[in-house]
Amino acid sequence: MDVAIIGIGIHPFGRTDGVTGLEQGVFAARQALKDAGLNWQDMQFAYGGSAAAEKADTMVSKLGLTGLQFINVANGCATGGSALQSAYMAIQSGMFDVGMAVGFDKHPRGAFTVDPEGSGLGKWYGDVGMALTPQFFGMKIQRYMHEYGISEDTLTRVAVKNYKNGAMNPNAWRKNAFSYEEVAESPMVCHPLRKYMFCSPAEGGCAMILCRADKAKQFTSNPVFLKAAVVRTRNFGSFEVFTQGQALDRADAPTVQASRAAFEMAGVGPEDIDVAQLQDTESGAEIMHMSENGFCADGDQEKWLAEGWTEIDGKLPVNTDGGCLANGEPIGASGLRQVYEIALQLRGEAGKRQVPNQPKTGYTHVYGAPGLSGVTILSR
Amino acid sequence: MATSIADQVPIAEGLFTWPSNDPRLLGSRCTNCGVVTFPAQSSCAACAGTDTETMELERKGTLWTYTIQCFLPNRPPYEGPETPETFRPFGVGYVELPGQTRVETRIKCDDPDSLRVGMEMELVVEKFIEKDGKDIISYFFQPVEAA
Ligand SMILES: [Zn+2]
């Protein structure tokens, strides 16, 4: 059973004072319904998630108490992506014809807070100053740069590109295109990563209406088909955040596993992808994820960025909406935002940041704590 | 300043041998597949086995990767002694202990900019902070030439 996306909705990302996370989710849900030409009463089910804001299922008190099956999803940084994957399975199973995946969040300002004891790490770990996610990102890309000859120049180029794309996205948080110098000279946070190479926790909401592919044309003339939706978690030996003792033998990252499974499910390969959204928690993540998702060999990113191959007019545009760097990261909505952008691009509705030559196939990838990854492949 | 060993308390039980003149980090080895982990665990994440034995880890290894923490971490949870005025960036990294595991550690080094992947490192167990009249003892690694 193929699955189609027939409606998409988004609440602008960033900071929206006076509007709760849940209200941002409701806004996105209503937009998605309008886009599909459907009413809330038509939804047979919904999967929703939020990490720091209200429980997603309480949206029904605003959207309407229709008795539908509403299931809350909580899956770390892949919460939004997991809501979508669950909705995909619900339709694929044949149990439902049409439903919604929705996510929203509203994180407090500042870095994500970590509770070492609640995460099974021991109180000492926080006491000594190691329970900080930016350290992991710094250490992972430091090793990668050492092994594959990636330069700080390439880290800077990723950030400059994503802010440039964000400046063309009316729903992005950061709409100022930082110059190369502004990024390269911003304060060091966790070596080799600087302030403007990191995304920040933020707010936002995003929703999709999904239906059986064979019914999609009843609702819309421009459906986008979900060819694969996969979530994978870490294997023993992959290098993940908050690993106090790391195995000597490296295993493939969860992204590698999710990516391979998604390509197999969709029956396409990396060379078939026309536009991609790859998790860019910081610049280094986008670089490593280019190869973990199979788009280039380790080390080739140096050339890819220098040649501009991931720019909007390049051979594989990456993070055309500005990615996490320009949008911030509301965990519940982040994975869905990526799919929203790909759907816009495939529908040819991305405005100033539209990828040329009518892209046919797109790819999304979300990654985060505690070591999980969600990939989707979409086509029109 | 605490002076006797009775006034010195390890930051966590079972993390390293203490009291000791030659303290070692404590890990565990799976009796089924032989994989070594740090800190010691009662089950094995590699093979799902549930039989492990505690072991002392090597004192020396090489720096596998590192970062430099350039801002004062939030309190809680951080308990380090610095103030915003006295804070100096510090190193954090993974030290590969030959044939065993890679241990995540704070790095004791006056000039973190001098850190390099592949450097030889050695274990130091010493005072981290003073709390309620006692020295809280933790573990660090430092470049060997700094000894
Ligand atoms: Zn084992």
Image: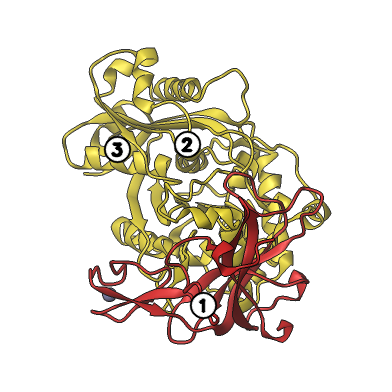
Quadrant housing residue A223: top left
Where is the C terminus of chain A found, in terms of image quarters?
A: top left
Q: To which residue does mark 3 refer? A: A87
Give coordinates of residue A279: x percent, y percent. Answer: 52, 52
Q: To which residue does mark 2 refer? A: A333
Please name whichever residue, A250 or B22, is drawn nearer the observer in this view of the structure. Answer: B22
Query: Which color mode does the image show?
Result: by chain
Secondary structure under the numbered disc 3 in the rendered image: helix
Give coordinates of residue A112: x percent, y percent. Answer: 56, 43
* In the image: residue A314, left or right of residue A274: right
Q: To which residue does mark 1 refer? A: B20
Q: Residues within 10 Å of mark 3 (few under 14, many from 20)?
A: many
The residue type indicated by label 1 comes to: Ser
Residue at point 57%, 54% (across, down) = A127
Determine whether label 1 and label 2 are within 8 Å by CB.
Answer: no
* Residues at marks 3 and 2, CA–CA distance in whole angstroms: 15 Å
Q: Is residue A140 visible?
A: no
Q: Is residue A32 visible?
A: yes
Residue at point 42%, 46% (across, down) = A118
* Residues at marks 3 and 1, CA–CA distance in whole angstroms: 57 Å
Secondary structure under the numbered disc 1 in the rendered image: loop
* In the image: residue A30, left or right of residue B131: left
Residue at point 50%, 39% (across, down) = A337
The chain coloured red is: B
The chain coloured yellow is: A
Where is the N terminus of chain A found, in terms of image quarters?
A: top left
Q: Given the image, what chain letter belongs to the residue carrying mark 3?
A: A
The residue type indicated by label 3 comes to: Ala
Q: Given the image, what chain letter belongs to the residue carrying mark 2?
A: A
User: Do marks 1 and 2 both belong to one polypeptide chain?
Assistant: no
